[in-house]
């Protein structure tokens, strides 16, 4: 996504868009460790198919997570599949100038691409208890004494990565809808550096560096499952690490799509 393209949208505008998304039907050359090294040896022919993947936690995690999908597609379509990890600001360039015609991006990037490039929907990714939908939460440490969004005025807040639908945008929207302007009412807010920003935001609340922050539901579920936080239904509420101050409406998770000039027959194969 070009910096210029994103610059046309205000933060409030993006927040409004993601809140209405409930009605919607969620680079560079491949690095060492791309799907080529993970996929089993299968019989393929023809030009390799490049699929762009928006980086979530890190390049390595993205490649490892979808290597099995790449191998499965290669087997079914009889062509080698190469995964291209993409940062948010690289998506538009890769689709327009580098010949990538199939991609997986989050829901807000999909909506922006749809407005600018007339792309086609292939499938929505199903993950977690809500299938192809998910939510974002605003959380505070249980011992903090913070019990409502109004208590956040004058406090420190940590978001996930900017333009992350469930780690930044829905939380920004929730604050605005409840009469809290992050630019004026929050004493200080920040976004963690580096990879795994969602998890870092949750940890920063857990260990008291920030008073409250963003918690994407899928990350909370995964961290609870791995024993890194206590936030699941198997624990009594009084043993939870956090209190949930607000939760967004469910909205689409990540989305697979194709450009308008992609081979329609190949798109049908990939969809099936």
Image (cartoon, helix red, strand yellow):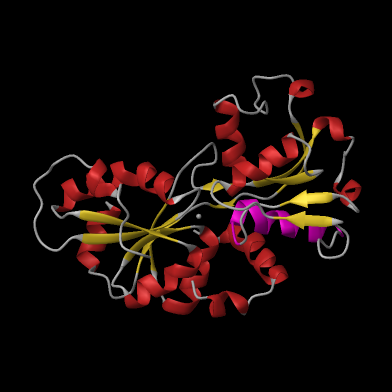
Q: Name the residue: 49% across, 51% down.
A: 56
Query: Is residue 172 highlighted in magenta?
Result: yes
Stretch in magenta: 163-179
Horizontal placement of 241 versus 180: left or right?
left
Regarding residue 216, the answer to whether it shows in the image is: no
Query: Is residue 173 highlighted in magenta?
Result: yes
Residue 41 in the image, given as x and y percentages of width and height: 13, 41
User: Magenta-highlighted stretch: main secondary structure?
Assistant: helix
Location of residue 267 by image quarter? bottom left
126 relative to 236, above or below = below
Q: Name the residue: 60% across, 62% down.
A: 163
Location of residue 91 by image quarter? bottom left
Horizontal placement of 190 versus 3: left or right?
right
Residue 87 in the image, given as x and y percentages of width and height: 47, 62
Residue 32 in the image, given as x and y percentages of width and height: 30, 50
Horizontal placement of 87 versus 231: left or right?
left
217 relative to 229, above or below = below
How many numbered badges does the structure rendering display? 0
Q: Name the residue: 27% across, 51% down.
A: 272
Q: Nearer the viewer, residue 155 or 14?
A: 155
């Amino acid at each position: 996504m070009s910096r210029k393209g994103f610059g046309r949208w205000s933060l409030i505008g993006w927040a409004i868009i993601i809140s209405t998304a409930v009605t919607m039907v969620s680079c560079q050359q491949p690095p060492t460790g791309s799907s080529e090294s993970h996929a089993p040896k299968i019989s393929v022919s023809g030009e390799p198919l490049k699929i762009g993947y928006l980086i979530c936690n890190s390049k390595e995690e993205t490649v490892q997570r979808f290597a099995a999908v790449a191998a499965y597609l290669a087997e079914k379509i009889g062509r080698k599949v190469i995964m291209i990890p993409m940062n948010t600001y690289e998506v538009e360039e890769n689709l327009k100038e580098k010949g990538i015609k199939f991609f997986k991006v989050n829901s807000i990037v999909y909506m922006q691409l749809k407005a600018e490039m007339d792309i086609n929907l292939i499938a929505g990714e199903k993950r977690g208890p809500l299938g192809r939908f998910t939510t974002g939460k605003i959380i505070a440490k249980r011992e903090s004494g913070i019990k409502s969004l109004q208590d956040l005025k004058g406090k420190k807040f940590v978001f996930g990565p900017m333009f992350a639908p469930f780690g930044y945008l829905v939380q920004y929207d929730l604050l605005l809808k409840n009469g809290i302007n992050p630019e004026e009412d929050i004493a200080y807010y920040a976004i963690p550096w580096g990879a795994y920003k969602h998890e870092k935001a949750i940890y920063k609340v857990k260990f008291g560096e920030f008073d409250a922050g963003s918690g994407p539901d899928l990350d909370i579920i995964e961290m609870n499952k791995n024993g890194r936080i206590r936030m699941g239904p198997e624990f009594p509420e009084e043993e939870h690490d956090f209190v949930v101050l607000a939760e967004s409406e469910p909205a689409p998770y990540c989305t697979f799509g194709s450009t308008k000039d992609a081979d329609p027959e190949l798109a049908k194969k990939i969809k099936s």
